[in-house]
Image (cartoon, rainbow, N blue to C red):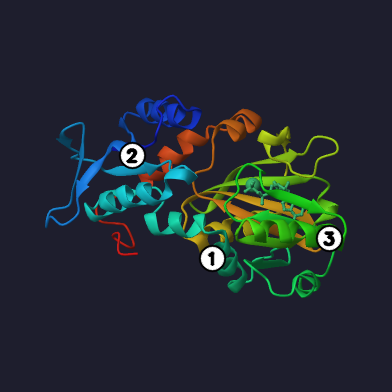
Amino acid sequence: MKIAILSRNPRLYSTRRLVEAGTQRGHEMVVIDTLRAYMNIASHKPQIHYRGQPLEGFDAVIPRIGASVTFYGCAVLRQFEMMGVFPLNESVAISRSRDKLRSLQLLSRKGIGLPVTGFAHSPDDIEDLIRMVSGAPLVIKVLEGTQGIGVVLCETEQAAESVIEAFMGLKQNIMVQEYIKESGGADIRCLVVGDKVIAAMKRQAKPGEFRSNLHRGGSASLIRITPEERSTAIRAAKIMGLSVAGVDILRSNHGPLVMEVNSSPGLEGIEVTTGRDVAGLVIAYLEKNAAPDRTRTRGRG
Ligand code: ADP
Ligand code: MG
């Protein structure tokens, strides 16, 4: 197969591993810098140009679209879909997953366990908002944050009020969430490929910290997940419409709670921690499923 990887940087671990795994399995791998691709969207024959040439003959495309280039990245991916090229994850599913509000609403509608969560922009009654999510301790999150930045634990209602007021002053969309204390600063990253969890790791926050993000000094280790956690991760990915996803789960007293579903999960942490050939399994998924014009949406979303 001829497989495109949409990525800003061929030197990134995940990109390198996908190229390596694809090449090893006999495929032609081409890394395309997402922001450098350009296209004529009004033509009756959809095309993408790159470095002065049309991109042709691709069987599949692997989107590795960073949060900061979601808008343009999804447009390029959609153009591939219009050309009939099979996407590992579809553009509609990726844009859906990038909207935390929409994602949680979708998951909630389908009965996936979630921490009690409120959304607000400029709440006219902060005390009531806090009551709505059962009071302190609370986790308050800026909607556009990543890598744990903009995620604050408020031990008291007074602290929560001050933080909400501060974010209101900054005109931010915020999430106000029940604090899952019993997870003990840990969460579980499940890597879903197709209808399987092919690898899972536990991320533990450093002492004195509740955020388990590796960027915040957290550490990763192997973990055995329960059948319920497994099925929750698979269902969450499926509801989002993602073939490949990193599903983050908190272990609570009343079962697994999904925190977020990531559509371009990093491969380094999970491959190094679990020793699994995640990149190889992703390519194997494409070998089994990629066929022309098999996108469900054909870029319609
Ligand atoms: P980001 O998108 O910036 O990674 P997250 O929502 O994943 O933000 O939160 C960062 C970390 O904070 C999580 O990995 C988890 O360890 C911790 N955390 C987030 N929400 C909660 C919560 N409701 N209860 C307990 N811990 C939480
Ligand atoms: Mg996170």
Q: CA distance from mark 1 to mark 2?
A: 26 Å
Give the number of the disc on residue 102: 1
Comparing 110 with 51, the one in front is 51
Q: Earlier in the sequence, mark 1 or mark 2?
A: 2
The residue that appears at 52% across and 59% down in the rendered structure is 99
Mark 3 or 2, which is nearer the eye? 2
Indicate the secondary structure of the residue bearing disc 3.
loop
Query: Which element type, helix, strand or loop, lies under badge 2?
Result: helix
For label 2, the residue is 35
Say whether residue 222 is left or right of residue 62. Answer: right
* Residue that numbered label 3 is attached to: 253
Observer-side mark, 1 or 2, equals: 2
> Is the residue marked by circle 2 packed among few (<14), some (14-19), or many (20+) residues within 10 Å?
some
Ligand 1 within 8 angstroms of badge 3 C-beta: no
Q: Residues within 10 Å of mark 1 (few under 14, many from 20)?
A: some
Asked if the residue under mark 2 is in contact with the one under mark 3, i.e. CB atoms within 8 Å, the reply is no
Residue 290 visible to an observer of this rendering: no
Q: CA distance from mark 3 to mark 2?
A: 44 Å
Q: Above or below — where is 155 with respect to 275?
A: below
Tell me where residue 172 appears, x and y as whole percent. 60, 58
Residue 202 is situated, as x and y percent measured from the top left of the image, at 72, 41
Q: Disc 1, ligand 1: is the CB inside 8 Å?
A: no
Q: Secondary structure at mark 1?
A: helix
Quadrant for the N terminus, please. Answer: top left
For residue 212, which quarter of the picture? top right
- Residue shown at the point (42%, 49%) measured from the top left: 70
Q: Which mark is residue 9?
A: none
Q: Residue at x 80, y 64 (%)?
A: 254
**Residue 25 percent across, percent down from the top left:** 37, 29
